Amino acid sequence: GDSVTQMEGPVTLSEEAFLTINCTYTATGYPSLFWYVQYPGEGLQLLLKATKADDKGSNKGFEATYRKETTSFHLEKGSVQVSDSAVYFCAPLGGSYIPTFGRGTSLIVHP
Amino acid sequence: DVKVTQSSRYLVKRTGEKVFLECVQDMDHENMFWYRQDPGLGLRLIYFSYDVKMKEKGDIPEGYSVSREKKERFSLILESASTNQTSMYLCASSPDSRTEAFFGQGTRLTVV
């Protein structure tokens, strides 16, 4: 089945720092790739997605590029804010229709 | 907007009780899922359903069952609650195999 490996957290940054959260995956077929975000006490919500190789998904200043050759989908943001503090999940959706999630990466941004 | 609604945000139940967690989605999605989320373990799939009255076991189905009598509603049942089922439970739905999942707000269940 599908699987995903994310960098361990928590990631602690100061406001306006650059963020990278690494994600590599294995999936059957030609997967769609997603990043979800979970704010404290809430369910997950879609942050961005990419459906084919070399596509770049973007939203709220976050970006991730679908790299088929390295099976990666790393999340980046040039300048984080305190309000970005949350847990981030990388999720491939491959041959099955079942979303697969990693353990998530907690991001803590200090003022 | 797609909406997935879980019946309770917080629940406290006693050991041995039968517990029902309800989830309703309003976008006619075919697929529905139940996950539990625990610190350090991420999201683990309990059960899923791809059609009315159809259900499939996920990775950790022991101690749980599900019901999907109508397309919009997917219920998770804890037959006899135990303290190790204390967790955050997340319901999700999706329309197909290429589109993102939509999540409810979660139910934090405490079994005492």
Image (cartoon, coloured by chain):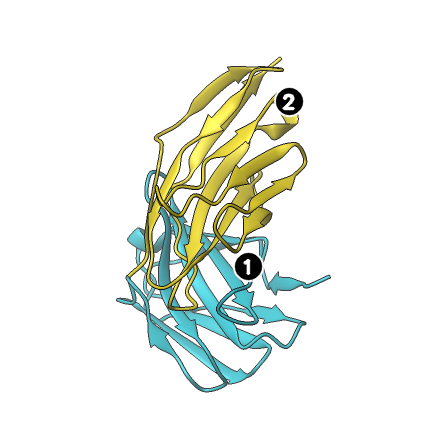
Please give the name of the residue rendered at 45% of the width and 79% of the height, measured from the top-left corner.
Answer: B67
In depth, the one of B37 and A5 nearer the eye is A5
Tell me the quarter of the picture where residue A72 sits: top left
Do marks 1 and 2 share a chain? Answer: no
Badge 1 density bin: few <14, some 14–19, many ≥20, Cα 10 Å: many
In the image, which lettered chain appears cyan? B
Residue lying at 49% horizontally and 38% vertically, measured from the top left: A88
Residue A38, horizontal then vertical, whole percent: 54, 42
Q: Which chain is yellow?
A: A
Q: Chain of mark 2?
A: A
Of residues B36 and B29, the one nearer the viewer is B29
Which amino acid is tagged 2? Answer: Gln
Q: Is residue B41 above or below residue B51?
A: above
Where disc 1 sits, the SS reads loop
Q: Chain of mark 1?
A: B
Which residue lies under the disc numbered 2? A81
Nearer to us in this view, B12 or B6: B6
Q: Which residue is rendered at x = 40% and y = 49% of the image?
A: B37
Task: Name the residue tied to disc 1.
Answer: B100
In the image, what residue occupies the spot 55% across and 63% down? B99
Which type of secondary structure does the marked residue at label 2 adopt?
Answer: loop
Callout in the foreground (1, 2) = 1
**Quick check: A61 left or right of B67?**
right
Q: Position of residue A24 (x, y in %)?
A: 35, 42
Three-letter amino acid code of the residue under disc 1: Glu
